[in-house]
Image (cartoon, rainbow, N blue to C red):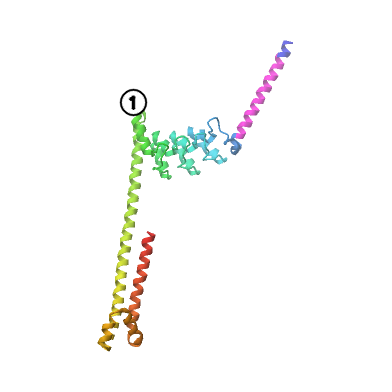
């Protein structure tokens, strides 16, 4: 009797173990074969399998998960993405893989509005900071406290305990140096662009001025030519032609003699008008 009972219990135990093995196998199959179904479920923190692989820096797992369709910009409950987790823990190679697969380098979490650059810099990971900046991370992005990655890292450095300063001070200062150099480079670039634009404006203004003066000179030559012809005809006509309306009347009455001079005057006036219109349009357009 006892033997039969032991035998029955053993069979039940084997069945239970078998069922557990089957369940674990099915879960494993879902995780690795159908990531689009399971990776969005995550755990109690809302993190997906890709989050945890990025957190640990398991590059091979990250590659496999991405190849099977894992969402590279999936959000945990606090709004962090896999890139946030990789940057926070200094997983530089993982960061490169995520960025290459379309991770948003300027994504902000829900709690602090922090970007991956905030996390990498404040945690003291200079190599990760370099990779993020090279990928276009915004060094001027501000978190919920209104701090840029540089501001936030400097504040955290001031609050470090003695033990933390021994462990992280050197790396944190390296991050601060990288961010400062990047900021100076951006400022110099902006200054260079501004200088180039100012030079172009000065050149444009000079060209416009000289063309306008040339048009005025041509127009004046034509006007004086007509007046000279009028003086040759009659002194009274010459004096009268000093006034534009009379000058025009004289041209109409003596068209054959004044034709060339009048056309020169028209050309000069046209140059002046066109130059003024174009100059005004350029000024309005910046």
The C terminus: image quadrant: bottom left
Q: Which residue is mark 1?
A: 162
The image quadrant that residue 7 belongs to is top right
**Which region is colored magenta?**
6-30
Q: Position of residue 114 (x, y in %)?
A: 44, 37
Q: Position of residue 109 (x, y in %)?
A: 47, 37
Q: Residue at x 72, y 12 (%)?
A: 3
- Label 1: state its secondary structure: helix
Q: Position of residue 67 (x, y in %)?
A: 55, 41
Magenta region includes residue 264? no
Q: Residue furthest bottom?
A: 233
Q: Nearer the viewer, residue 207 or 286?
A: 286
Q: Residue furthest left?
A: 235
Q: Is residue 84 above or below residue 243?
A: above
Q: Dot 1 surroundings within 10 Å: few (below 14), some, or many (20 or more)?
A: few
Q: Is residue 136 above or below residue 234?
A: above
Magenta region includes residue 24? yes
Secondary structure character of the magenta stretch overall: helix
């Amino acid at each position: 009797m006892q033997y039969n009972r032991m035998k029955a219990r053993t069979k039940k135990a084997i069945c239970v173990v078998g069922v557990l093995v089957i369940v674990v196998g099915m879960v494993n199959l879902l995780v690795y074969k159908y990531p689009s179904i399971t990776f969005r479920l995550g755990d109690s923190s809302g993190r997906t399998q890709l989050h945890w692989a990025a957190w640990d820096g398991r590059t091979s797992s990250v590659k496999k998960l991405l190849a099977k369709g894992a969402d590279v910009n999936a959000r945990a409950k606090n709004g962090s993405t896999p890139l946030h987790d990789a940057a926070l823990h200094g997983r530089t190679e993982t960061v490169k893989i995520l960025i290459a697969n379309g991770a948003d380098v300027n994504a902000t979490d829900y709690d602090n509005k922090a970007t991956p650059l905030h996390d990498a810099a404040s945690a003291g990971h200079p190599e990760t900071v370099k990779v993020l900046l090279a990928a276009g991370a915004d060094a001027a992005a501000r978190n919920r406290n209104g701090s840029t990655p540089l501001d936030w890292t400097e504040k955290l450095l001031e609050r470090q305990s003695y033990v933390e300063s021994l462990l992280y001070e050197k790396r944190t200062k390296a991050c601060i140096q990288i961010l400062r150099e990047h900021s100076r480079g951006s400022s110099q670039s902006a200054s260079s662009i501004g200088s180039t634009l100012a030079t172009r404006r000065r050149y444009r203004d000079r060209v416009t001025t000289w063309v306008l003066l040339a048009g005025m000179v041509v127009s004046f030559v034509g006007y004086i030519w007509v007046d000279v012809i009028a003086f040759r005809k009659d002194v009274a006509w010459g004096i009268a032609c000093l006034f534009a309306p009379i000058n025009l009347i004289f041209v109409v009455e003596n068209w054959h003699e004044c034709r060339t001079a009048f056309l020169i005057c028209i050309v000069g006036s046209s140059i002046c008008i066109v130059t003024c219109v174009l100059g005004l349009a350029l000024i309005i357009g910046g």
